[in-house]
Structure formats: C-alpha cells, structure tokens
Amino acid sequence: MGKNLTTRAEDYSKWYNELVIKADLAENSGVRGCMVIKPYGFAIWERMQAELDRMFKETGHQNAYFPLFIPKSYFSKEASHVDGFAKECAVVTHYRLKNDPDGNGIIVDPEAKLEEELIVRPTSETIIWDTYRKWIQSYRDLPLLINQWANVVRWELRTRLFLRTAEFLWQEGHTAHATKDEAIAEAEQMMNIYAEFVENFMAIPVIKGLKTESERFAGALETYCIEALMQDGKALQAGTSHFLGQNFAKAFDVKFANKEGKQDYVWATSWGVSTRLIGALIMTHSDDNGLVLPPNLAPDQVVIVPIYRDDEQFEATSNVANELMAELRSLGIRVKFDNRDTHKPGWKFNEYELKGVPVRIAIGPKDVENGTVEVARRDTLSKEMMNKSEAASAIKELLDEIQKNLFTKAIDFRKENTTEVSSYSEFKEVLESNGGFILAHWDGTPETEEQIKNETKATIRCIPIDADDASGSCMVTGKPSARKVIFAKAY
Amino acid sequence: MGKNLTTRAEDYSKWYNELVIKADLAENSGVRGCMVIKPYGFAIWERMQAELDRMFKETGHQNAYFPLFIPKSYFSKEASHVDGFAKECAVVTHYRLKNDPDGNGIIVDPEAKLEEELIVRPTSETIIWDTYRKWIQSYRDLPLLINQWANVVRWELRTRLFLRTAEFLWQEGHTAHATKDEAIAEAEQMMNIYAEFVENFMAIPVIKGLKTESERFAGALETYCIEALMQDGKALQAGTSHFLGQNFAKAFDVKFANKEGKQDYVWATSWGVSTRLIGALIMTHSDDNGLVLPPNLAPDQVVIVPIYRDDEQFEATSNVANELMAELRSLGIRVKFDNRDTHKPGWKFNEYELKGVPVRIAIGPKDVENGTVEVARRDTLSKEMMNKSEAASAIKELLDEIQKNLFTKAIDFRKENTTEVSSYSEFKEVLESNGGFILAHWDGTPETEEQIKNETKATIRCIPIDADDASGSCMVTGKPSARKVIFAKAY
Ligand SMILES: [Zn+2]
Ligand SMILES: [Zn+2]
C-alpha cells in the first residue's frame, strides 16, 4: 500500500523525518529547534509518563516542581557542571516589552533589564540543590526522593524531531542520601527501573553499563546508562542515572546532622529520560509502512473499521463492532471504532498502518453473515479470519504475542549486529561495513578513547555491567584491558 | 494545640503565607517571584490534574504540547492580545554563555544574540494558532479540541505563593470550530466543567457568569468565569473560558473549506485553570489550626497513628492498624500508616492537623484491648470512639459527610456574605464593614464601572448567568439596568 514514505534502505534519516510527520507524532514549530508534539505523539508520551510515574512512586519517590529559571550565578557553583551545561542555553535578560515610540511595533524595553540574567533550565541540579539546603537538616530528612516532570531547554544548532530539540520534555529525579552506598544503590536502582521500563513496556532491548569518564554527566562521579541499538546500526542512549557524590552538596552547602549529631555533606543522585525515547521507539520497531507500536504503549491497541455500501450494511456491521468493542474493553483493551463516514475503509487501513495500531479489525457484510471478523497484525502485516465469538480472547493473546514478538525481533537484530573484534583494523572494517555494537578491548585511557573517536567517529557507549570480565589487550595500544567495552556510532 | 500559626482574625494575609509554608505546600525560590511546589502541594495539584484531565478527555479533548517560546512578532498579530499580554514577560535575547576573558566567571556571549527575541509564553494562543493554520484545511478537521498542561510566565511585581507568581502551572484549552454557535457552546461547556470540578471536587461553591467588557481576556469577545468567595470577604476568579470569535483565525489566517467548499475563518475558544486554585482551596476551607482538605482532593484521606510505650505495644497497635488499613484500602480509601519511631504521637497529630488530613485514627493499647479506635475529623475537630469492626465502613461514610459538610459550610458562608444593595452609599458601607459579594444595579457602561473601581476598589466580578433578570436603575447614575451584577474586592 502506498504510504509515499521514503524507504529505510533509500534514506534512513529521511524515512525517520517523514514518518514522524506523517504518523502525526510531531512537527517543527515557528520557533527554531522547538517542536510541537501533536496529540497522537503526546498520547504515547502520556502512556510512558503514567508507567514511569507509577514505577517511581512504587519505589518511594514523590513529585515536586522547581522554577523554570536559574540565576546565572548558580551555574558557577559546581565547577565541572558549568562547563557541561551553562554554554548553549536560552538567556532571559529583560522582563518587559513596550510599544516602540517610533511606531515599529513592540520592542524590548531597555529599562527593564534584569540585574542578574536568568537561564532557562537545561537541567535542574543547581536550583534544586539550592532548595535542598533548606529542606535537609538531619538524618530524619533523608533520604529525600524527588522527581520532577518538566520542560528543559538546550540550545542545539542541529535539531531533529524527538532526537535533539532545543526544548524537550523529560523527568529528572534528584535524590539526597546519608551515605555513599545508599546513593550508589539509588543510582543503580533507577538504571534498573529504566531498563525494565524500556524493555518490558517499549519492547526495546538495552545494555546496562557505565559511562567512561569523558562521557559522564557534568558533575557526576559515575554515570549509569542504558544503550539501545537502532535499525541503522547506530546506538541511542535511552536513559542515564548519575551518582553525583558530594559535589552538589558541597557546592550548595547541604549538610545534615547524623544520628550521632555530627555534620556531614549529603550524597546525591540524579536521573532522567526524555521525549527522546519516542525517537528510540520509532527507530527500533517501525518499518517502510510507518510506525509500529508495542501494544503496551499504543494509545489505541485495536481499531475496528466497518465496511459497508449502504445504511443497512452500516447498521449491521456497526452492531457487530459495538458488541466486539464492549467485549474487548471488558478485557481491559483500548479499542477505537472508526465509524466516520468522511473517510473510506482503504484510507483508514492506510492511516492506522501508518500510525502503528497493533491490531486492525475489519467487519464487512460477509462477516456479519458468517459470524466472522478479519484481524490484521501491524507487526507482521498478516491477516486471519476469526470467529467473532472467539475474537476477543484471541485478540487479548495476540496483543501479548505482538509485544513479545517486537522485543524478540529487536533482540535478534541486536545479536546480528553486535560484533566482537580483536584488532583495530577489524574494528574499522565492521564499523564501516555494518555498524552496530562493537565489543573491543580498550586500555581505559581517555587518550585512546579520544583517538578512536577522532579516527572513526565511534564512541564508547558503555562499559557493560552484565558482561563477564575477560581481560585482554587494547586493540589500539596493546596495553592491558580488564574487559571489552561497547563501541558504536551514536545518535 | 499550638501551631504557632498567626490566626486569621489577627492577620489574614500573614495566616495564609504561614500556612502555605508550614503545611509544606510551597515556598519561595532563589528566583524572584518563582515558587517551589513542594511534594505535598504537588500531590494536591496532581489530584486536581488527574480529575480535570479525565473530564476533558470525556468531553473529547486531547492533550498536545506547544513550544515554551513565542517569537516576539507573533504577539503583534492580534491587536488587543498584545496589549494584554506582551507587556510584563520574560524575554530571551541570547542563546549562549561563555567564560569571561577577564576571569569574572561566566557571562552572556554578546555574539550570541538572537535575531528575533523570544518571549516565554504568558499564554499560548499565538503560537497555537500559528500551528492550527497547518492543521486545519477542511470542515473534516473540525472541531479541533486540544488541551495543554504547561508552565507559563507573567512577570509580576508583587507575588504571593499560588495566588500570583511569575511562573505558574496551568492547563490551557484551545479549540477551533466551524460555527460561532459551536464555539460558544464549547466555551459554556468548559465553564460548566470547571464549576462542576471546583464545586464537587474542591468543595468550593462558585458563581458562573460573564465578565464585563473591561474585565475580558485580551482578544476575547466573551469571557465566561467562575467566581468564588474567600473567608476574608474577597473574591477569587477560579477559572475562565473565552469565546474568541474569529480574532485569532484572522490574525493567523486560519481558514477552512466548509461542506459546500466555501472558505471561512475558524471560530475559537480558550480556557484555563491554574495552580492559583490551590490558593482558593486554602482560603475557602482552612482554619487557625492549618489546612483543611476536602476528602476528594486529599493525597491521604486517612492517617493512622499508633500510640505505644514499648515494642510489645507497638506490635499490638501495628497489627490492628495494618488490618484496618487493608480494610480501608479495599474500600478505595487512601490511607497512610505513620509508624515512624522518630516522631512522637503528639507531634504527628499536630502535623496532620496542619496538613489537613480529613480523618485521623489513633490506636493505643487500651483500644487493642477494647477492640476500638479513636477517629478524629479535621473539619470539625471532633473525636469519637468506634468499634474497630465497624470502623472501615463508618469512615467511608464519614469521608462523604466531610466532603459535603465543607461545601455546605462554604455555601452558608457565601450566603451570609452576599448582600443586595439598592444605593451607592449602602454599597460602600457594606464593602467597608463586611466585604463579600455585593449585588447591585449598574448601568452597563465601562465609565461607571471604572468610577466605582476607582472610588471603592471593588470590581464587577461577573454578570451572573443563573440569576433571574430583574431590571432596575444603576446605583450610581440612576440609568436603567437589566439585572444586578456581582461586585467585590478581588484577589
Ligand atoms: Zn551505556
Ligand atoms: Zn465571574
């Protein structure tokens, strides 16, 4: 069926851009680098939010809200943080507009200049730790387990819908703990929660690991991350969780009295995922016909399309559709009955394929006669006839199967595109010919990492946590290496 | 019990400020005029959001997300809108910071000046209607029923937590319709939804009405609103819904082809409520002991406090508490068991009174022996003993009763503080001595309205919709008046 979609083989990047637009997920706005998230894209984000929020609350976290603006001086307080974040950002310098006395419309009022510029938050560690100083006095106030759902702004020169936008939506967790061990356990827990969410809910397999020093979050002692592999062989960082040590506590003077009454600095973590995950979702599952959504995430899991020529047929097929819809809903399935008379069945089929609805049901006059319905799967594009009486329970199983199938397909793809190499030349060859995750020995120095990056554009995605240690020697320098790490070109 | 809270009689405004801080709802941040919403305050907002979001979706609205920034030129496109909104606002002029070459920390990079300044949205009509131009071509695309949950910024000189802050959280609905009648029906529907929510969920009675021309939203042809009366006799506008006519469609050139293929401009509405509602909540129900929460809105509806001297008593009371908690939860009640050993029962009683938890249960060793529990109501501060076996179902009823009681109390208060006057001198007298809502005849002119405002500080809150028409003559000019309108001093 003609989607007028560039194929992935033709131009992967163009395919992605077109799909985002045509599936009604998002579009560029009149503001450079800022996107509009359209209702369908936002409904997917809402499902992600609801599930993550549940997982955060189940593990004792509470939501709160901190200011959008951060005084410029706050950024200077944590030395490494300022280098990482206070660069490309939106700066508020004035607080008033006025009518131009020369009649040129409205202008910025030069008299309304702020004494100290405000930065639109690129991330909220500084404003939050400035607040925590007031909230934390004693061990009784710890742990402090807070999450915020918010918009953030990072001025990017080259933007792409969902993957890199000047403004994006995310959640950022910021926790404070009495001990180092507790903070590390929290950072690890959140990496695990992210992995569970992304794998079980989004059907995207991830590798858990640690970032190298040069890839760490600005201000972190350790950055845990989950890395996913996209269909074009490039990696995408799907979530990060940072152990911040006492850096922010020292920068913002956040101390607590322990049980013995002694003062000590608090230990910190922060962790976040963003609307970027929608980019990962698209690039993991979708195909040349459009979006493919895992049932757990799909705003509509099933759509029913009636096929009719006249009012009588419309009524007959609608009756069957309404019955089936009620049955499916009673099983907890999200169903939509598209009975619009403004669009033809073929147009609707095309539309729901493009939008990735997992299961499409068609009901025509013949089906009414025979007590059947036609059930099409989006993931395999296969169709089967079902007896209407058995359809609801069969579709419930089918949705589970689709969820599993998408994950299995993605796991298989990753296996096929993960290569262990033993020499630098082999490394370069695989990177050029196939891409994907490449496991290789590295001597642990930022210099070698930098050299590889400059020569090949591949970065170390992570030092995997779940892999066995197996020592060897660095593919570039021949120096000793404790274990292979994962390289890839990345989004 | 000593809350160290200023009483309302002493200083209402100070009482409010202290309560917001001491009940852990919100606090001022290091950024002028911007608040931090603390976890307890945010949990209340989340309950409000969830209920409103459900009501919006049930009436066919979808959520989406539009950019935080609005190009300055967009504001000039709708003439009356620019006067109302593009004045006190946060202006982004630069997109980069750099290290000061003279070593004075970080400074704004003068080379990174934006060609066109960006305004941090004070409301999103302009950016949204700029987007709708691309979304709307035909009658098939209408109605477009979109809502956005977002932060907005209006630079205010004098701020107060929740009531008036530079940044606040809200929802803004923006809809597009094929006909004028449909748009008016939508604006009225949303006013009704707000009234239903505020009355049934927040237990705050409201008067539905129309704003006078001078109090209308900038760019609206008609502003519908709901007005509530606070304990100090001042009014608070709790929500507004605007019929925007074709103003924004014309300003942003949004046309559609109707069924006959003729081009016409689209009809618009917008509507919103904000975190300001939390201020209304506090000032309607709370007392000198702290916050009073209606059960529908309370993050914890019931709290259980164990009273014990030793481990044995702790175990015995905890067993009873856990049983009761399970029973309450099975009835859908939100319960917290505060078994912390870091705080004494008296401290906890005080804390939950301050935080407005509707029902507090105390369980001591005597209760374990006698099969009883002590149940205290926050609204009346009364206590009663209950048989533990009957407690769960009795508490369920009690929560309903508290919800109703709070609404009834507020309705009674409003009745007692609503006065009909027939002369301007009586008007001034009531306004000075008692305040409250004052019903009076007005000749319908902005001039008289302005005169009354200047002379008394009272504004017309609304032209009530549900009141009977009864003509008379204006209390100031003696000119004819079709019906009495509602005056008050307002927040
Ligand atoms: Zn990694
Ligand atoms: Zn009103």
Image (cartoon, coloured by chain):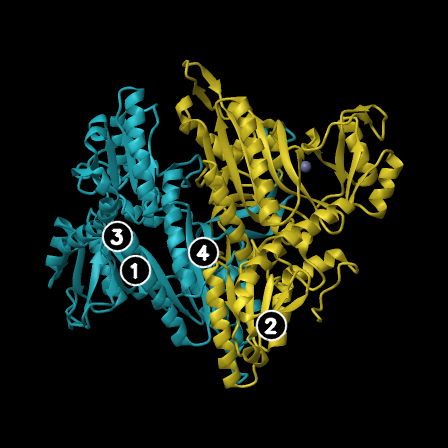
Chain colours: A cyan, B yellow
Give the side of residue A174 with respect to residue A415, left or right: right
Q: Which residue is mark 1?
A: A195
In this view, A338 is above or below A85 = above
Q: How many neighbours does mark 4 have within 10 angstroms: few (below 14), some (14-19), or many (20 or more)?
A: many
**Are tags 4 and 3 found on a single chain?**
yes
The mark lying in front, picked from 4 and 3, is: 3
Q: Where on the picture, by quarter, is residue B298?
A: bottom right
* Tag 2 residue: B348
Query: Could you say which disc has been placed on residue A213 in the image?
Result: none
The span from disc 1 to disc 4 (Cα, nearest Å) is 22 Å
Q: CA distance from mark 2 to mark 1?
A: 38 Å
- Which residue is disc 4 drawn over? A123
User: Residue A34, image x and y in percent?
Assistant: 42, 41
Regarding residue B406, the answer to whether it shows in the image is yes
> Of A4 and B104, which appears nearest the observer?
A4
Residue A261, percent across and down? 55, 83
Is residue B417 or residue B320 the one in the foreground? B320
How packed is label 2: few (under 14 Cα within 10 Å), some, or many (20 or more)? some
Quadrant for residue B462, please give it.
Answer: top right
Q: Measure the C-alpha gap from mark 4 to mark 3.
A: 28 Å
Q: In the structure shown, which secondary structural element does the residue marked by tag 2 occupy?
A: helix
| Chain label for disc 4 | A
What residue lies at 62% left-to-right and 55% top-to-bottom?
Answer: B401
What amino acid type should be assigned to the residue bearing mark 4?
A: Thr
User: Where residue B65 sits in the image (x, y, percent)?
Assistant: 44, 41
Task: Name the chain under label 1.
Answer: A
